[in-house]
Image (cartoon, grey):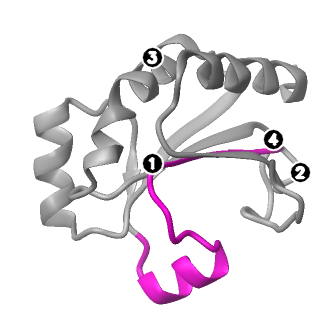
Amino acid sequence: MVKKKFKVFESNTKVTLIFVFGTRCKHCIKNIIPWHKLFNNLDREKINIFAVTPDSLHLVRKYREMHNLQYPVCVPENLKVFLKDYKLDLVPQTILVGNDSTVINNWTGFLTTESTGDIIKTISKNSYN
């Protein structure tokens, strides 16, 4: 559970689910199926969903095609600043950001059926119509 709150977005009206991965990360591949399930089963009218990776656009394009990623994937312009500001030194991570732009929770590592259920419950508690 995240103890410290920090702003991710300046303004947002929905909760946001962010998948953080590396294209060369063997553990990240294990999260592709749970992330696909979350992306396909959550109401995107109430939640934003995208992924972030520190890798090059070339690697991201190949990875997206190889794994049929349907969600948007962002590559930060300044990797060092991004990693420092958001304290992202481990992948995979699944981060839930509230509509007030603060991190609600962060799941590091492989998502089990239990942790995926926890994500859905947490989203339900924090989504507003």
Q: Which residue is drawn at 89% across and 59% down?
A: 3
Query: Is residue 27 or residue 80 the one in the foreground?
Result: 27
Inspect the image, locate mark 4, and give the three-letter code of the amino acid beneath it.
Answer: Thr
Looking at the image, residue 80 lies above or below residue 113: below
Is 77 covered by the magenta stretch?
yes
Question: Element under label 3?
Answer: helix
Residue 122 left/right relative to 94: right
**Measured Cα–Cα span from mark 2 to mark 4:** 8 Å
The earlier-in-sequence mark between 2 and 3 is 3
Residue, disc 2: 100
Inspect the image, locate mark 3, and give the three-letter code of the amino acid beneath it.
Answer: Lys
Residue 28 visible here: yes
Q: Nearer the viewer, mark 2 or mark 3?
A: 3
Is 7 covered by the magenta stretch?
no
Looking at the image, residue 125 lies above or below residue 97: above
The earlier-in-sequence mark between 2 and 4 is 4
Residue, disc 4: 13
Query: Is residue 71 or residue 81 the one in the foreground?
Result: 81
The earlier-in-sequence mark between 1 and 4 is 4
- Stretch in magenta: 76-98
**Measured Cα–Cα span from mark 1 to mark 4:** 19 Å
